[in-house]
Amino acid sequence: MLKLALRNLLDKKIRFALTDSLRSTFGDLAQDIAGETDLTVRAAQEIGLAAFRAGRHLQLRLARHQH
């Protein structure tokens, strides 16, 4: 039982170290790619009709509560 507990503890520690290392590596990579960029342009995201209707419904409800 003690052997199993120690193995689980070691596995968690290794997983944490790998996760932390990967997170750091990707963070550094993103920083290297962006460099000293002051502006980043991304594609516009289309909003579907359902999202538009939900937003419109919320606006109408807020307008009713304000009066």
Image (cartoon, rainbow, N blue to C red):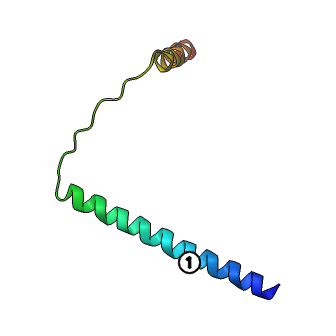
Check disc 1: other Cα within 10 Å, few if <14, some if 14-19, many if 20+.
few
Q: How many circles with numbers are drawn on the protein?
A: 1
Q: Position of residue 55 (x, y in %)?
A: 49, 20
Identify the element where label 1 is drawn.
Answer: helix
Relative to 49, is 16 on the left or the right? right
Q: Amino acid at mark 1?
A: Ile
Relative to 48, is 6 on the left or the right? right
Q: Residue at x 51, y 76 (%)?
A: 17
Residue bearing mark 1: 14
Q: Residue furthest right?
A: 1
Q: Position of residue 60 (x, y in %)?
A: 52, 12
Q: Residue furthest bottom?
A: 2
Q: Residue at x 69, y 82 (%)?
A: 7
Which quadrant does the N terminus fall into? bottom right
Answer with the quarter of the image where residue 30 lies: bottom left
Comparing 3 with 20, the one in front is 3
Q: Position of residue 18 (x, y in %)?
A: 49, 72
Q: Residue at x 76, y 87 (%)?
A: 3
Comparing 39 with 66, the one in front is 39
Q: Is residue 2 above or below residue 63?
A: below
Relative to 59, is 12 on the left or the right? right
Answer with the quarter of the image where residue 48 lies: top left
Q: Residue at x 46, y 15 (%)?
A: 49
Answer with the quarter of the image where residue 2 lies: bottom right
